[in-house]
Structures are given as C-alpha cells and as structure tokens.
Image: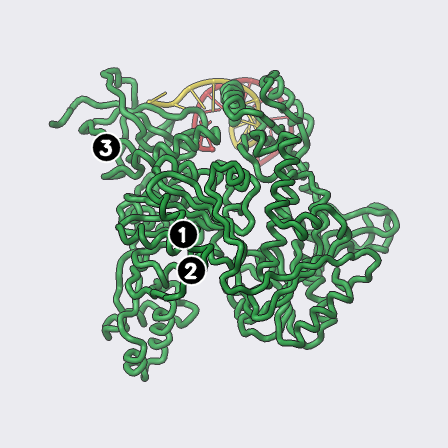
Chain colours: A green, B red, C yellow
Amino acid sequence: MINTAPCIVQVALKVPFANTLDYQLLAETSPDLIGRRVRVPLGKSQWLVGVIIGLKNSSDYHHLKPVDAVLDEQPLFNKNNLKLIKQAANYYQVNLGEMLMTALPAWFSKPSNPPIPQEIWYKALSDKQIAEKKLKKAPKQWLIFEYIYDNGPQIPAALSHLSAGASTLCRQLVDKGLFEQSNRSFIDNQNIEHPDFALTDDQQRVLNHIHEHRHHFNVSLLDGITGSGKTEVYIRSLLPLLANGKQALVLVPEIGLTPQLFRSFSKRLPGRLAVFHSGLSDGTRARVWQQAGNGHVDVVVATRSGLFTPFKNLAMILVDEEHDLSYKQQDGVRYSARDLAVLRGKIENIPVVLGSATPAFESLRHAFDGHYHWLTLRNRTNQKALPKIQLQNLDNRKTYGGISRVTIDTIEQQLDTGHQVLVFLNRRGWSPKLLCHDCGWIAECDDCDAYLTYHKHNNRLLCHHCCRHYSLPEFCPNCGSQEMDTLGVGTEQVETALQQELGDYPVIRFDRDSVSTPRQWQQQLDRVRTGKPCVIVGTQMLAKGHDFPKLSLVVVVNVDNSFYSTDFRAEEYLAQLLIQVAGRAGRAETAGQVIIQTHQPKHAFFHTLLQQGYEQLARKGLEQRREMQFPPFSHMAIIRAQHRYEDKLEAFLLELIEAIGQDPDVNVMGPLPAPMQKKQKLHRMQLILNANNRRGLHQLLKQLLKKHNPTAGPVRWFIDIDPVSFD
DNA sequence: AGCACGCCGACT
DNA sequence: GTCGGCGTGCTC
C-alpha cells in the first residue's frame, strides 16, 4: 500500500556541523530506504549527496525541505556496512557523513548520479598453438593474443604498450573466435593450476588452524619470515570458502603490490577476482564496488580504501603486510584499514588474518597476550639460508658517494660473479644539505622548516616537503663567501660515485626523480629483469614486494638517523625496513648477504635485532613502552593545528588545553611545535593526548569538539586517533 | 565546508 | 562614489 503522506528521512551528509539532517520524502515508506543515497538541497543553492540512515515517524514535516531525488534503487550500504561506518566515525571522531563519503568511491558522490560506465574485457579462448597458426599473417594480433593468454584478461587500455589501436585488434580477435569479450571488471578464472607440491609442516599446521576457525570472528596473526610461503597459506585458506560460494577481501598496503598478489591468486583461485585501488579510474572502482556488493565477484584484492567494499557473502578478510603504515590514511579521516578490518571481522562474525614477516609491535602484543591466534612460519619453503646480515662500522672510513671502499669491493665481487646488487638509502637527490664552509649557513626552504636538497642533474635546490625549487646561490646569502659545499649523500650521488667506481657495470636508479611514471618504472625494471649484473640504487619504493632473482647483496647506506628520532616507534620501523630490504637479497640461488653501514654498530638495537631476532626486539620494545606508558599500553590522539601566525596558533592551542581541563586519565602534552614547524607557509603545532583508557579519551575529545568547532574559528585543527607518525 | 551578509580601505 | 578584503553566522 502506498503511503501518500511524506515521511521524514535522516540523511547523513558531509557537512561539518551535524551528523544528520532531516528531510521530507514523498514516497513509499519502506525500511529498505536505509542505506540508499539521496540528492538534497542545503542552504542557499547547494545540492549534496547524502545517505539515508534512518526514518522518523512524525507528521511534523512541514518545515523540512524535500528530498530532490533518491539516487539508488537498492541500498548501497547494508546493515553491517552501516554499522562498521558508524562505529568507525565514532572511533575516529568524525561526522557520520564524512566517514560515509570516505568509504564511498568518489563516483557515487556526484549529485548528477551518472550511470556506472562499463568496460570491455577481452579473454583468450583458444589454445596458444592454434592461435599461433591462425595469426601467422597478423603479427600485431598475435602480440595481443599472446599477452592476454599469458597475463589473463585485460582491457584494451592496458594493452597500449603493445600496439596502437589495441581495441580494434581485440575486436578482430573476437571475430576470429580467439577472444571472448565481457562487460565486467573482474576476471573469471576457470583454468586454474592445481600444483601438487606439499605444504611444509608449518604451513599445514597454520592452515589447519585457520581452517578450524573459519566460521566465526577471530584474528590470526600470520607471523612468517620472508619466503616462508604466506601467499600459499592465503590461497589455501581461501579455496574452501570459494568452493562454498563465499567471498573474501584481501588488503594489500599499496598499489604496487596488487598485481603480484593478484597474479598468484589468478593462477590458483577458481572464481571471479577483482582489484580495487586508487590507480583505477573512478568508474572502474564504482563498478567493482557494485559487483562485489551484488555478489558478482568472489575475491577483491584492494588497498586501504577497499576495506569498505560491500559484499553479499563475505567470509574472510586477509590483511597482507599488516604492519605497513600505508594502512593508516594520512589525510581526511585518519583511519587505519588494518584496525577497521578487525572491527569489520567482528561485525560480520568472520575470521581476519593479519600477515607479516615483521608484525607491528601492537599486533604482536595481541598475539603474545592470546587475543590473536599467533601462527608462526619460521622456516623457508625452499630451505634456503636467510641472508647473512653484517654491520660495517663507518667510523674513520673514507667513503665514495657514502659507500666505503670495502663495501665497493664486495659489490664488485658480486658483480663479477654475475650477480646483482641493491644499494638502499632513503634520500633522493644529490645531497640533503647545502652548507657554507665559512659561516655554517645551510640552505633552507622559505615555506617549510626543512633543509633544501641539492639535485645535480638540474643544478637546483629542491624542498622535498613542498616541491618548491630554488636556483643555486653563487655566494652564501649570509656572509658572501663562495665556499659553498654539499653535505650528506643522496641517491643521485650514490649512482654517480658507483658508476665511476664500477666502470662498465650499469647502475640503475629507482627514486621519484628517475621513475615518475609507471612506464619508466617498467623500463627500469625490465633492465634489471634481464638478469645481467648491475647495481640498483633505490629508495623506500624498492623495499617492498619486488623480487630480483639475481640479487645477492643488499647494502644499506645510512640508518643512523633513526636513532635520533623523536618517534617512539622509530626502532620498530627501522627493524621492519631492514628485514624487508634484507628479504630482497635471499631469493637468489646463492645465499644472500646484507651489509648495513653505520656509525653505531654497538647500538643495542643492532645487538637485539641481529643476535636475538625481531620477536625479541618486539618484546623489549613493548616492555619499554609499558614502562613509559606509550601505545599499545596507552591510547594516543594528536590534535594537529595550523595557522599562518605562530603566536595565534599557540594562543589557540592554550585555549584548547583550557577547555580540556584536568583529567586524571588523560595526559596532555603541548602545545608542541610539529617536527617540521612550518610547511607550505603554515605553522604547525600539536597537542599530544596520552590516555590510560580509551573511553575517557573519547569522551574528552567529544566534549572538546562540542565546545570548539574545528571548522568555525580562524585556526584549523583536526584529531588524529592512534597516530603513527608525528610530522 | 560553502555561501550569504556586513562593515571598512584603495581605486576606475 | 564603488570593488573587495575576510570576520560572523547559518544551513534540515
């Protein structure tokens, strides 16, 4: 029966002043309005997209504006999804509307509600030999066929590197009966491999455990060293679920790692696999979202924002590399996809598996305490020895581009025996400082509190924080001296020095300056993949994922900065990074070797990590945090504020402290200048709140938000719950 | 957040 | 005389 009286809907909108606003809706009152999007007017002339999150029974609707349109025929968010988002909004202290819009692919927030664009995928139908015969006279078509045959279904846009006019060629292949086209954003796996290799005892034990606990919420920490076969465990955990027609969500920390895992999965998992990450177009992301929600996709491999993908029948969430900081969003709503994955598992009552070779100390603590099932893989599947790590004291050693003579000799030996070498350092450019020898002046950015990095290729100074360029001063602006010199070493300099020292061997540099496009990335990677001896010089971007089979030696140039960091997690991060880069080495046919150059080889950190291992480092680190009352033994939040004038900013934060008042459970530190006090002309300051109970902290923040609207006054500020970085 | 209203300085 | 600065206030 149609109810002709308007009903009142509560709409969550991305507006900073309210969680929901009420509108009247002249339509059939039905409970399944909840979770559907609407277009509503707000204020003078704003059309906004919001989500209906409740209905009200009242005849008092005359003062309410009407909903302009209901944009969805079916709810875009189901009950569990809304529950997750509501709890996340509450936890991270943001509006429901803001959390909803964070969860929703951008495509769905357009008021015009355009239809989701479709995309044509091509899939090889025929056998390779048959196709080769048929395509003897069509080399371009053969190229396309071979690529799709080897790499699985693709869209024409992904084939542009093979040939121009790829979509035409694909259509011709369909006409010849060699290709099939489909209108969806996933691949439908049928010809999967069933390898007959046996799992190691460790893997089997872990797998049995996951299998036994697959029907209810529980968290397993899959703590497995590099090469211990975590991916195989993921695959075999998923197989029985997929066989029962269920769905799974797999999170990876960054786009670069999706293809790898996706490729392993596509060889082995029967079913429909899709990826979801920021590298896809808005339209594609919307499509994957919709199809996962409809149950048309079985497995989604996604980065952070994919955590919110709706599913019809979700049965498991895997979080790969769970320690990775990329899971914490660093702008907008500062949520942690790993933490929310656990919450989602709880809400859906399904298992969550967190995997890492170097679990976050926080996660390990849950494992030690028995909150998480602690599943360890301590042996490598191929029985190969782990790389040998050795420290090299840099004191009193002459260096060439930051690298000692002994190390260069070792590098040369490895190259001479046909191997490849990775030189890792986390600093791009030629040199991180430009210094005046006479007065000690150091070039700094006008807009930020940061030293300028000298880049030799364009002979300019660059601020790595705001990207502002400066030309090189001929005289010291402070004393007029011409004795300007660079200080410290960056990738550019390492590359040049090594090229000079190693003569004919190629030196291939990977950093944001030398590889800024996927195409360049691929080109550089191809040079390495030839397997010829070469030196790879790279930053952080090389630490993750990529396997170089010929790599036998990793040199870590400078790690000492971490020992002076103010971040209480600095050593944890350093250990994770070192183990990760070391993991790049051991995959060669010979045992890998890692050289860490440092001025502090006697530091307790190295002793613990190298003699006792990561687990022991974690136990010690956690013990210190317990004593100091730091997370995870306390609950932290940071209030971050910025303004053009330092004095105004400080005055405002003092006002906030006043408003916070005394709380026996919450320790307020500040106002502290942020480590980088000025960034892009804005001064930055913060208050650190450290609380011994979560509820108290949240109550306090809630009241603070009520008293001081963060978007109203002249000073902008926001709350970062469970911060992982302090810059 | 947007977008209005509103009250004071330098310009055709 | 106005154009435009950004302070304050409101949005179902």
Which residue is located at x 36 percent, y 34 percent? A48
Q: What residue is shown with label 2?
A: A199
**Marks 2 and 1, how far apart at CA:** 9 Å
The secondary element bearing badge 3 is classed as helix
Task: Decide: few, some or many residues near mark 3? Use Cα within 10 Å; few <14, some 14-19, many ≥20.
Answer: few
Q: Quadrant of the N terminus of chain A?
A: top left
> Marks 2 and 3: which is nearer the front?
2
Left or right, residue A619 beside residue A606: left
Above/below status of A310 relative to A668:
below
Nearer to me, A348 or A509: A348
Tell me the kind of residue under disc 3: Asp
x, y percentage for residue A137? 32, 84
Q: Are marks 2 and 3 in contact (CB under 8 Å)?
A: no
x, y percentage for residue A434? 77, 52
Q: Quadrant of the C terminus of chain A?
A: top right
Is residue A727 visible in this depiction of the protein?
no
Tell me the kind of residue under disc 1: Leu
Q: What residue is shown with label 1?
A: A207
Nearer to me, A544 or A345: A345
The chain holding disc 3 is A
Task: Decide: few, some or many residues near mark 2? Use Cα within 10 Å; few <14, some 14-19, many ≥20.
Answer: some
x, y percentage for residue A713? 55, 24
**Marks 1 and 3, how far apart at CA:** 39 Å
Nearer to me, A205 or A255: A205
Q: What residue is shown with label 3?
A: A32
Nearer to me, A135 or A465: A135
Which residue is located at x 35 percent, y 69 percent? A148
Above/below status of A672 relative to A528:
above
**Marks 2 and 3, how far apart at CA:** 47 Å
Q: Are marks 2 and 1 in contact (CB under 8 Å)?
A: yes
